[in-house]
Amino acid sequence: MTDISALSEADAANELMRLAKQIAHHNKLYHADDAPEITDQEYDALVKRNEALEAAFPHLVREDSPSRQVGHEVATSPLSKVSHEVRMMSLDNGFSDHEIREFVARVRRFLNLSDSEPMSFTAEDKIDGLSCSLRYERGELVMAATRGDGQVGENVTANVQHIADIPQHLQGENLPDVFEVRGEVYMEKQAFTALNEQLMEEARAAAEAKGETFDPTKVRQFANPRNAAAGSLRQKDASVTAKRPLRFWAHGWGAASEVPGDKQLVVMRQIEAWGFPVSPDLKLCENAEEMLQHYRSIGERRPDLPYEIDGVVYKVDRLDWQGRLGFVAKAPRWALAHKFPAEQAQTTLEAIDIQVGRTGKLTPVGRLAPVLVGGVTVTNVTLHNRDEIARLGVRPGDRIVVQRAGDVIPQVVDNLTRDEDRPAFIFPDHCPECGSEAVAEEGEVDVRCTGGLICPAQRTERLKHFVSRAALDIEGLGEKTIDQFFALGWLESPADIFRLHQRREEILALDGWKEKSVENLLASIEAKRSPDAARLLFGLGIRHVGAVTARDLMKNFHRLETLRETAELAGQAPPLQGRGRSRVAAEGVGDVDQALTQPDSPHPNPSPEGEGLESSATEALVTLTSIDGIGGAVVEALGDFFHEPHNVAVWEDILSEVTPPEYIVETKQSSVSGKTVVFTGKLETMSRDEAKAQAEALGAKAAGSVSAKTDLVVAGPGAGSKLKKAAELGIDVIDEAAWAEIVKAAG
């Protein structure tokens, strides 16, 4: 990772953009989908890197910065939304003793307290569950909501009524008119294990009842107790929640008409008296050393606790001091989560399997001798990619150290037998699923299968992409139908879609299909026999060829065969020699820029005929790269695609079934003809691709960034740095409605 002090402003801005997207992606997986794909430590490292960059370049802080976000926006939940009267914040994290001592010192400095001034903190274990806010009015539970993005959560009132730890009525007298108790819904380890076993048995019984072969690998189980708790609470049908063994404990409060005390510990004890469980390890500490001692005590007992915890939370005890300290963007200054390190264990790496994902990525997975890590038996470990295997030097038979962090798939942290004399593991250069070449693009560590649509591991996802709205947009051919037809052997490639009319009677014989639905499906398919060439190209799923890139290519080549001829020829330009830049880059050969700037570099075929081919190939390469928006990555991807015979067969097969007309972009005279337009922010009535297509149809150029050459910026909600730059440069800015008027005026 590049030292921050060595970064230029442009590099820092680009990294902040990538981090914002990465962290938002992982926030959604964790908070909205309950399906994290990286460890807590990996996530925390991304957050810390973002914080460090923002500290070094404060003027580059983005509107969508992770430092301003809490949780994740509630998007497609079947539950109704609830706005929190008092925002539900997250916590900043500390990882070392030094950071905890600095936290205490920072609080003293902020409050201007002397070293002799007594200052206490509460300390309690941080349970790994789903945050929930419970609103009581005159002692009666009236609303329960998840955290969501901190401002808006999901209404789970009916669901929490089935959690025994949550009282429907508060105990005691003189209760506040309004009081929101906040805490975590969780599931104990033993209950989690029992639930997964129950799901497995239910699936087995269902398969037997249908006379089907039971496949345990297809049973969907919860990955960890936190996911189990979240999935059980966030049910539209509360009767499902009622069957799940959920627990709750309180750790704070939100909106309150009256707070029963002037200290954190006093209020927590009152909440406990009202009938709520609180952490049995909630304790008052007088200084940093007591806080660290309590942290170590909890850490030692962690493996034996009946529930999962991932750290200890410290809070300033005096509430008036909490009020003075206030909040930063998404977290209180008066609290800190001291996270535990990942749990580790030793075992033997028995095998390395290569799995092929839906995008063609080859992912190595280590098969382990079973080992208990953090109360869970682990048998698989992620090895990430080819470079990670080389870095660790792992081979089947090695004794390794694995860690399980954040309760997701574990990772290898050390190879204890690296020096033993055994052959290195050879990462495959062909796809184990389809035999196509597997390559890594220049600058990337991931190796991908080039088989595309002929690869079984990718085929159904590619078919779904092919019929999607932005591609051929074939109505009636949804994901379930594609899965069904693929399983029956009717769909192997896109061309098979246009041969489904031959299976009309077979489709009619399937459950759920009627005469009308079959006719509609076949009519929808037939309507796409003359598809838009750019949509067809995009639908083939060639890496780096998105909808906009496909249009850019077709605007220049007009016919798909012309594009193919140019791409194939460009693939033979030195130093690629027809094998794709990624394949030779691994051998230390130069790149496209080198081919253009060093035409006299050695070439294995110096014959006049070879020189003629080389000249034509270089010309083709220049033709492609001179297209605005087409760079080396696109050229390489096209070369890889047409280099693979399987892909060529798919290409020719689909063109035997459909006849795309010549691609001609008809532009209209408009007020933006000849101008450069940039779209930024969230567009609410159309997609970004649709907006760019509109601009092109009006004779304008749609650019991705704001510069002195930009004539107009169309800004939707959430527009950030681009809008700021437009203002600095004095560029005209309009909203989406004004853009719609321009489109309408052009007819």
Image (cartoon, rainbow, N blue to C red):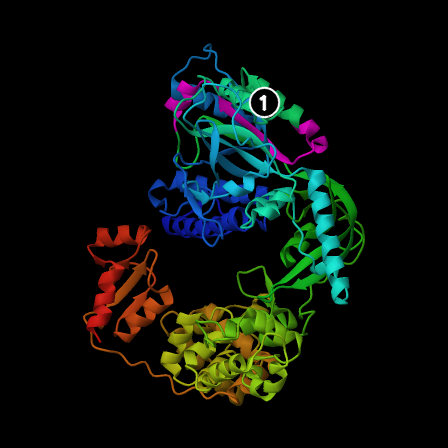
Q: How many marks?
A: 1
Q: Quadrant of the C terminus?
A: bottom left
Outermost residue, top side:
116
Looking at the image, residue 687 lies above or below residue 54: below
Q: Is residue 25 magenta?
A: no
In the drawing, does residue 725 fall left or right of residue 207? left
Residue nearest the observer in this picture, 198 or 320: 198
| Vertical position of residue 274 compared to residue 135: above or below | above
Tell me where residue 395 appears, x and y as whole percent: 76, 55
**14 over 613 or under it: above or below:** above
Which residue is rendered at x = 37% and y = 48% of the image? 9
Residue 685 appears anywhere in the view: yes
Say whether residue 569 is visible. no
Q: Residue at x 45, y 75 (%)?
A: 473
Say which residue label 1 marks. 282
In this orientation, which residue lies closer to the viewer: 634 or 434?
434
In the image, residue 413 lies at what x, y percent? 68, 44
Q: Quadrant of residue 279 in the image?
A: top right
Magenta region: 299-326
